């Protein structure tokens, strides 16, 4: 795990130096709020709307973090509806999945392996998991996401009314209700 957190530390240092608004999500956030999970990637949400020359700035940050940057893949992410791109580390088996956001990030401070970081809020993480469950085909493949939501709720204080409101906007309210997540 030391190598994994070394990778996370490089990512944090590069984003902090560039003054990018970012927050970790995915398995790292699930491990913080719920139950520890192993993974070979790190997921980060990056607010790019307010950045000047965001593609160029992000490419520079990723290179400083020791990642291989494919400009075509990054350009495709900026123009696609999904706005996600993956970058592999040059000197480790890890990769970074970058989720581009046009909005101000909803995040909170946390500490992982002695490193102070920002994580996507538990409410935002649950809402993202509900959207993932909705999009997963066949539905049986969403068991991990359902388990993640239940772990977050078991170990972290969550504003369920806020999650329910977002679920209504995302049209995932039926999934929210089916999981027994009553607000």
Image: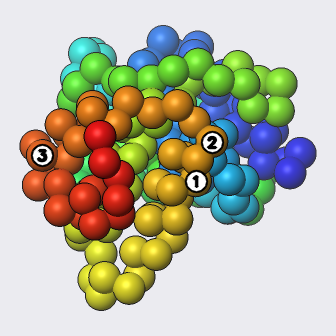
First reached walking from the N terminus: tag 3 or tag 1: 1
Reading the image, the residue beneath label 2 is 155
> Of 135 and 59, which appears nearest the observer?
135
Q: Secondary structure at mark 1?
A: helix
Assess disc 1: are there few (<14), some (14-19) or many (≥20) residues with their C-alpha within 10 Å of its C-alpha: some
Reading the image, the residue beneath label 1 is 151
- Depicted 92 relative to depicted 108: above or below: below
- Identify which residue is drawn at 31% across, 82% down: 139
> Of 57 and 83, which appears nearest the observer?
83
Q: Is residue 113 visible?
A: yes
Disc 2 and disc 3: Cα gap in Å?
24 Å
Disc 3 and disc 1: Cα gap in Å?
22 Å
- Identify which residue is drawn at 72% across, 61% down: 38
Point out residue 66 in the picture as x, y percentages from the top left corner.
Answer: 66, 41
- Looking at the rendering, in which quadrant would you find the C terminus? top left
Point out residue 104 in the picture as x, y percentages from the top left corner.
Answer: 28, 20
Assess disc 3: are there few (<14), some (14-19) or many (≥20) residues with their C-alpha within 10 Å of its C-alpha: few
First reached walking from the N terminus: tag 2 or tag 3: 2
- Mark on residue 168? 3
């Amino acid at each position: 795990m030391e190598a994994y957190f070394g990778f996370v530390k490089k990512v944090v240092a590069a984003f902090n130096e560039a003054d990018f608004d970012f927050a970790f999500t995915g398995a790292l956030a699930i491990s913080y709020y719920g139950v520890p999970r192993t993974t070979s990637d790190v997921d980060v949400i990056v607010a790019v709307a307010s950045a000047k020359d965001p593609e160029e700035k992000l490419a520079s940050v990723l290179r400083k973090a020791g990642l291989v940057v494919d400009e075509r893949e990054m350009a495709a992410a900026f123009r696609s509806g999904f706005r996600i791109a993956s970058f592999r580390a040059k000197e480790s088996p890890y990769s970074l999945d970058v989720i581009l956001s046009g909005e101000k990030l909803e995040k909170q401070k946390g500490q992982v392996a002695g490193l102070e970081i920002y994580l996507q809020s538990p409410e935002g993480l649950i809402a993202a998991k509900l959207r993932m469950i909705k999009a997963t085909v066949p539905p049986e493949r969403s068991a991990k996401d359902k388990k993640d939501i239940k772990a977050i709720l078991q170990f972290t204080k969550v504003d369920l009314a806020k999650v329910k409101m977002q679920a209504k906007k995302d049209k995932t309210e039926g999934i929210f209700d089916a999981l027994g997540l009553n607000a």
